[in-house]
Image (spheres, rainbow, N blue to C red):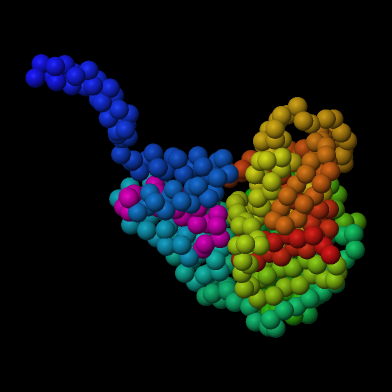
Amino acid sequence: MGRTGRRAGRFALPVAALLAAACPTRLPPPDPATEAETVLAQLAAGDLDGAAVRVAAARRMFPADGGLCACSATVADLLWRDELAIAEWRALAGTKDRAGWSMAVVRGRLGDQLFLSGRYGEALVPLLTGQVGPDAARRRALVAVARELPFRRKQVGPLTTEQPLPDDALPEYVCSIGDVRRVFAVDTGSSMTTIATSLATAANAHVMFDAGEVPDGTGRPVPVRMAVIDQFAVGDIWLGTVPVLVVDDDRLAMRDAFGGPERPPIGVLGLDVLALFRVSIDPVRKTLSFELPRGLPESTSVQCVRSDGRCLLPVAVEGRRLWFVLDTGASNSSLTEDGLQALPGGGSRATPGFRRVRTAGGGAVVVREVHNLVLRVSEARFPGIDLPVVARPSGTLFPVHGVLGIDLLRVCRVVFDRGRARLEPAQ
């Protein structure tokens, strides 16, 4: 017995150590605030996939938490999932804490989402109660125009409309407002369809309301008004009465930081209208077409992000996934300062260079450039690319690392449909 006891004593410590290693210390249970902070940190780092998975799991664990409702609505909006975002904003209004926001703020967010999705009639009451804080002027304008719009947005016409793609120029499309026909620039970098003051006068735009400021193509704030135009058609597709932004003619002419076309546009088709269609840019057939959306398969396309009114694409650069604005209205591609810092080597990669960049006062400024980059987007590959570094504001929730302009987009076939995009080599 004594010998057996001594043997057992010899093995007691090793066995205990093995059991301790096999059963690590139990982690503290998750809490809603920590989960929400993690989701927001993932979004700030550009990890949309991780944020979507995390917030969905957290919502199941804490269905009554307001902060997670707000995070889920935000992620849904980034993913172009309007119906889910609307449902989550409504759920947030019914939570006890409302993420620390007042009911007016929550209702305003709901109204914004309803208006964005074209549910103008439903947006009226939330927008009326949400006219608070820095968004008051914009929501006041939204209410004024929503009263003149159909209850729901719709388009009528053929399944497809097609026009020639101009050579060596920004994409443009002939649109009409009643009997007034004008060439509109096709600008995926603009959040909303915009017309110049002179066109607003010619087309009898009405319900003109100051709507605060919106960022232009370089992120500079531009004062805008919101208005309604009637009998609007994109090519052969009838949209009827639609909301538009109105800006001074000279401001619209300066929307491209690198100069753009010699003939400045008088109207811009923005993301609010472009997202209604499957938009195809085909440099081989030299056509630009609008069709009814039908979606793109995940295997041959990439998920875009809708952030701050811009459409962002995932771009692989030297082993890093960066997020570039899909901007058919930009004549040149570029990096932001955040994009430069995200590259291996960071700021040391940039060398001095000279590019003519438009500013509010006009003139040229010295910028830095990064040379000989290889960019991969969807099925397209762009080798040996030199990108200037252009100062732009950072995204409020999601990073913006650069701009994919028409200089690169015109050498591949681009299809944009329901928040997904496919870029493939032109053949």
Q: Position of residue 311 (x, y in %)?
A: 65, 55
Q: Position of residue 246 (x, y in %)?
A: 70, 60
Residue 66 covered by magenta stretch: yes
User: Looking at this view, is 75 or 130 the one in front?
Assistant: 75
**Quarter of the rendering occupied by the C terminus:** bottom right
Report whether residue 297 is seen: yes
Residue visible at 71% across and 29% down in the picture: 345
Residue visible at 70% across and 32% down in the picture: 344
Is 411 displayed left or right of 72 in the figure?
right
Which is the main secondary structure of the residues drawn in magenta? helix
State which quadrant residue 363 falls in.
Answer: top right
Seen in the picture, residue 210 relative to 101 is either above or below; the reply is below
- Total residue callouts: 0
Give the residues in magenta. Answer: 61-82
Report whether residue 187 is seen: no
State which quadrant residue 240 falls in.
Answer: bottom right
State which quadrant residue 154 falls in.
Answer: bottom right
Residue visible at 38% across and 49% down in the picture: 58
Residue 404 covered by magenta stretch: no
**Quarter of the rendering occupied by the N terminus:** top left
User: Looking at this view, is 243 or 296 the one in front?
Assistant: 296
Q: Position of residue 411 (x, y in %)?
A: 83, 58
Is 300 displayed left or right of 113 in the figure?
right
